[in-house]
Image (tube, helix red, strand yellow):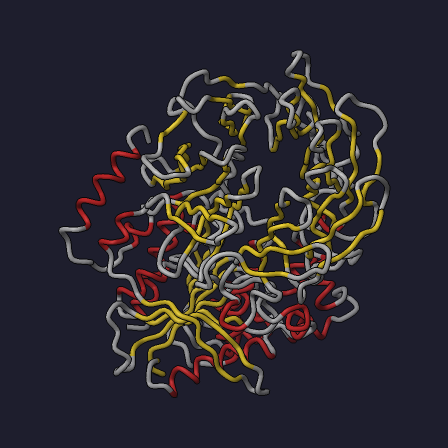
Amino acid sequence: MRHAGLLLVAAVSITSAQAPRKVAIDDLMSLRTINDVKISPAGDQIAYTVSTPSVARNAHEAALFVVPVAGGAPRQLGESYRIFSPALPAPRVRWRPDGRVSLLVAEKTGPQVLSIKTDNSAAQVVTSAPLGVSGYEWSPDGNYLAFLTRDAGPSTPPIANKVGAVPPATRLWIQPLNPAGPARAMTPADQYVDSIAWSPDSSEIAYSWAPVVGFLAPYQTKIFAVAAEGGAIRPLIDRAGMNVSPQFSPDGKKISFISTGERTGIIAPRGLAIADAASRNANIRAYPMNGAWIAEVHWMPAGDAVIVTMNEGTFATGAHMFEMPAVKVTLADGSAARLGEERATLQYNMSLSRDGQTLAYREVGARDMGDLVVMDVASKKTRQLTTINPELKQLALGELKPIAWKSFDGMEIWGLLLTPPGYDGKSKIPMLVYCHGGPIGGVTLGIFPQFMHVPGQIDPYPTEAFASAGFAVLFPMPRGGSGYGEAGHRMIINDWGGPDYQDIMAGVDHLIAQGLADENRLGVMGASYGGYMTNWIVTQTSRFKAAAAGASIADLSDLYYLTDGGDLMAEYYKLPWENPDGYARSSPITHAAKVTTPLLISHGDRDPRVPLATAQKFFRRLQALGKTAEMDIYPRGGHVFYEPQQEKAVMTRNFDWMLKYVR
């Protein structure tokens, strides 16, 4: 990565001399992703990290850059350090009050905080947590570093692991810097802390915590505060449901947070809430914005408004449900307005300058991986500062656009349609249906439409390579998933594979009727809930010539009994013994005898969300019934695969499977 900047410059000169070519899986495995963006408090520089997959070294490797807001050549920092790059890279780039940049780097004891000057000098690892740091924030006055680290467990491995035993806590620690002193724990061992925020005067820290860990822990969170010098902990938001991501207003008098409004169910929207910071549950006000799910919150300097990113809600419906815009919310009246030009984009990793004049973020368009963009907030004018994947100009990319159709009951359903490069719409072509995860999930714009928020190579289906091979790809957004609000989410309660299945098939019929999709050359694929839907589809119809299911759900009761998020199923189907007929009716394994489509199942052996056993049961039954089915188990694989060698292998396997049976 030392010469990454030179490589980018060289690539630009090459693209101008070559005609675009078809996309191969190797091309997809070389694309880079911006993981983190932070603008300096003065608003003159931006620090960001870029992750590059390396198949040879079997790792996603990150590099740190700083670029002037006015534009210019990026400078790479800290080349001699290995930036912390876990399964989903989260280097946590921050600016120190004195103008230095910091982020997490991999040390022998785990991730630690590295501080470095923007001239690439004075690099210093400033923490030494025995089990590493998972999150951190500098105090505004520069006198403290607050960080999160996990408590140590038993010194020797236990002979037996007790089921349901409480693991060591992740706690908030403070390390005094001026004057220097030893780090000290600030929160008790029965609180699992997940996010922190300093007050503007550096006197205290707000933190969100849960009494448990696991998939459902965020829905049991509270927000407390503790003084930097220690002392009694005081509750700020102490109520049921999700209450996370606290942020103080610029004057310290209010606090913003993301909340389900005392609702404990997973289907509840994660909305914006504001409260007074002086006392417990003081003047809490919700800003629902038509059921918006909030991702990020940033205060404007005057404290009268916040900038958020969202999906669902006012700015994410209809043809806009594939976008994630930045939205300014005026707190007095709750009015909201989209920032920036009215163009189809995703805006991730927002960072606002201290004066509120400049917003920096990663912007993703329909046919790219995202680049660093700055916006003048007042004028809403934007400038792109990077081109981290210039080789995209060498590739003949398909066209990706929103489409809509009417379902069985007249409801308007949306999806994205990817067509091959140069397709003129005058002939029928093979089509693959890509079912998204969730159920409350969806797709967006970008080269990897289901995974643009993270390094996209975790996508097991190389849709852009499929387009180059002559396939259209339909990404349906059926009810039950994102785009239709909470009411839409609830339309599949006790009925997975009911109206959502009909929505998908109505989209297939729509494209056949338009003369685009060849009804004799159809395939279907998806992972997690998309794996469920793929399995379900092939038990309900013989119209598809091939199917590929990842994180493959076959028996819904397995999700309750064998996973870390079993209560999710209870929200949809009640408890298995309360609704055995519902679980059985909606489980693909119940209908395995009707399968005629060749099915490829891919599964990680360490998937905590979809148990390997449910996929093995389905495969075993298909085998016993004499069906055409194959199954690949990926060692060390989780719910998705993070090792580039596995990412490439599963993409290739699914690609070859579809070409074998559909073309």
Side (left or right) of 263 relative to 624 = right
Q: What is the x, y in percent for residue 72?
A: 33, 36
Outermost left residue = 17
Q: Of residues 45 and 151, which is closer to you in this image?
A: 45
Q: Which x, y percent locates residue 582?
A: 70, 74
Above or below residue 265? Residue 499 is: below
Where residue 53 sits, quadrant-wise, is top left
Q: Quadrant of the C terminus?
A: bottom left
Question: 641 or 107: which is nearer to us?
Answer: 107
Q: Could you say where residue 102 lies in the image, as x and y percent from the top left?
A: 51, 27
Q: Is residue 391 left or right of residue 77?
A: left
Using the image as rendered, state which of residue 403 and residue 376 is in the foreground: 376
93 with respect to 3 (left or right): right
Q: Quadrant of residue 51?
A: top left
361 above or below 224?
below
- The residue positioned 53% from the left and 46% from the top of the image is 350
Q: Is residue 182 visible?
A: yes
Residue 281: image x %, image y %? 84, 47
